[in-house]
Image (tube, rainbow, N blue to C red):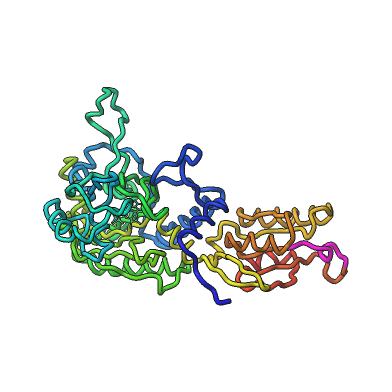
């Protein structure tokens, strides 16, 4: 049987069944747009973030890490334009009250629209195509007019008035924490331009219709890097960053044919250029991350808002100026989902159908699984545990499994993408003296097994 991919339903079911992702608050009926990561999900997510940190921070000399707080002075969101302009066009079905994003409904019937359009423009386009638009929940065609809905999530942190008249926001994106720390990093690390600041952290948005699993949540994590450059070098650096991000994503093992660049046709007024990296999710190509050239907008706005100069002083040329910013901004969840979709494979092995995740070994939530051939033979179990402990010391995420026949154990590991399984049998104990202290090592993708000395295991799978 040829290899085939999976449907969205099969991928979500696997994620839940095997402990990658659970719906949040499930025993209370769930909580829309929020997910919890289970024991395997947390490992997978960590590997994704570690890889991003490695290619973004460790493999370069000009990028610094940051972990800014989720809560920030609310003036930041005014200066950045979010309190006024961070909104999506909301339309409500008059029959069943389901709220939808008008731009996405239009896109679904092939009409060009986006969240940046003003209320008048999107209402005009929506009315023009009204005859073809149906409520995604009940199928009826009776809608309210479109209104812009602000996505910032409010809290009453520090407000003891009961009317929440001055809300503190949960950050809608992590990069604002980077902009407002530009001067701190400059003054404490003394980098020369160009340099960047990278951050991974939670962001929150009141998404009108969270959907497509991790793709559009109300709580999610972002990996963002803001790179500060000389104005005249902005576009050349932008092209370098685009190439860098695409190479890093290809390095994760995603199939090139499932990735593409999409240029933003409609730019916000300050942007120089904007492209998204799109992945071919089961419903079609959609945004996985953005790479944008933002000019001097962000630093200028925060300089105006705070009254503090956010400039760079070039001591050789004796000149002071506001650096321009290029950024890469990706969601951990969108990459997590893309990697799961890309790796999910069905084929046939030994006359049986199987599901396996063809993940790059470094990303797999479990790096190696160790089995004793039989669970009721203490000498096999204790030898297998010894091997397991040695591997766990090296890789952290190893698994011990003595449950069921070996074939079933292989299938269970295949399904979660474990690249290698190690079996300890009687030959390991010396039944055939020449095989003493050897084990079988099985490869996930081919199912091939080889006999290997325990002493060589770590270097072989490392
Ligand atoms: P979209 O148009 O899909 O709403 P966006 O253009 O508003 O996304 P950005 O504000 O550019 O997204 O955010 C940068 C990245 O953060 C996105 O490319 C995506 O990977 C991630 N992201 C944004 N919103 C969400 C969300 N609601 N859930 C999960 N990830 C998200």
Taking the spot 85% from the left edge, 71% from the top edge, the residue there is: 434
Q: Where is residue 380, by image quadrant?
A: bottom right
x and y, in percent, of residue 186 in the image: 29, 50
Judged from this view, the residue extending furthest toward the bottom is 2
Q: Residue at x 33, y 61 (%)?
A: 287
Residue 230 drawn at (x, y percent) = 22, 61
In which image quadrant can residue 384 be found? bottom right
Q: Is residue 350 above or below residue 93?
A: below
Quarter of the image where ligand 1 sits? bottom left
Please state the horizontal and vertical placement of residue 193, each as a whole percent of the image.
27, 59
- Taking depth in this image into account, of 214 and 165 the one nearest to the observer is 214
Is 264 on the left or on the right of 170, as rendered? left
Q: Residue at 61% across / 72% down in the picture?
A: 348
Q: Please provide the residue range marked out in magenta.
A: 423-431
Q: Nearer the viewer, residue 97 or 375?
A: 97
Which residue is rendered at x = 38% and y = 66% of the image? 279
Location of residue 318 (image quadrant): bottom left
Instruction: Confirm whether the magenta stretch covers residue 427.
Output: yes
Taking the magenta stretch, the answer to whether it contains residue 410 is no
Mark yes or no: residue 315 visible.
no
């Amino acid at each position: 049987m040829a290899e085939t991919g999976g449907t969205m339903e099969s991928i979500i079911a696997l994620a839940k069944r095997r402990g990658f992702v659970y719906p949040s608050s499930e025993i209370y009926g769930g909580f829309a747009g929020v997910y919890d990561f289970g024991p395997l999900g947390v490992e997978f997510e960590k590997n994704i973030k570690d890889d991003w940190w490695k290619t973004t921070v460790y493999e370069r000399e000009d990028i610094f890490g940051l972990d800014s707080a989720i809560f920030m002075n609310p003036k930041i969101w005014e200066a950045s334009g979010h309190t006024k302009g961070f909104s999506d066009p909301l339309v409500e079905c008059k029959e069943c009250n389901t709220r939808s994003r008008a731009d996405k409904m239009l896109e679904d019937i092939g009409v060009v629209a986006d969240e940046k359009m003003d209320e008048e423009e999107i209402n005009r386009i929506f009315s023009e195509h009204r005859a073809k638009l149906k409520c995604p929940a009940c199928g009826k065609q009776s809608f309210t007019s479109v209104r812009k809905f602000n996505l910032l999530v409010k809290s009453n942190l520090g407000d003891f008035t009961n009317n929440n008249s001055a809300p503190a926001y949960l950050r809608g994106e992590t990069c604002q924490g980077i902009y407002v720390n530009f001067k701190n990093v400059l003054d404490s690390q003394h980098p020369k331009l160009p340099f960047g600041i990278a951050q991974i952290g939670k962001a929150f948005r009141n998404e009108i219709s969270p959907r497509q699993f991790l793709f559009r949540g109300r709580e999610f994590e972002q990996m963002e890097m803001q790179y500060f450059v000389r104005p005249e070098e902005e576009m050349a650096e932008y092209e370098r960053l685009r190439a860098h991000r695409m190479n890093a994503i290809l390095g994760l093992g995603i199939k090139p044919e499932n990735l593409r660049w999409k240029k933003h046709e409609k730019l916000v007024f300050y942007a120089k250029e904007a492209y998204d990296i799109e992945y071919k999710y089961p419903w079609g190509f959609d945004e996985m991350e953005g790479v944008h050239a933002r000019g001097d907008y962000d630093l200028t706005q925060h300089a105006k808002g705070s009254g503090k100069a956010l400039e760079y002083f070039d001591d050789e040329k004796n000149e002071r100026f506001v650096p321009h910013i290029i950024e890469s901004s990706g969601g951990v969840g969108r990459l997590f989902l893309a990697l799961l979709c890309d790796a999910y494979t069905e084929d046939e092995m030994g006359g049986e159908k199987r599901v396996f995740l063809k993940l790059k070994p470094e990303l797999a939530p479990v790096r190696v699984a160790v089995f004793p051939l039989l669970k009721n033979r203490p000498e096999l179990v204790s030898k297998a545990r010894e091997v397991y402990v040695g591997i766990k010391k090296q890789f952290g995420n190893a698994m011990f499994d003595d449950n069921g026949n070996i074939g079933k154990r292989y299938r269970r590991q295949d399904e979660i993408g474990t690249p290698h399984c190690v079996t300890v049998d009687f030959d390991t104990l010396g039944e055939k003296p020449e095989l003493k202290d050897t084990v079988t090592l099985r490869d996930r993708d081919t199912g091939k097994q080889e006999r290997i000395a325990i002493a060589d295991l770590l270097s072989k799978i490392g």
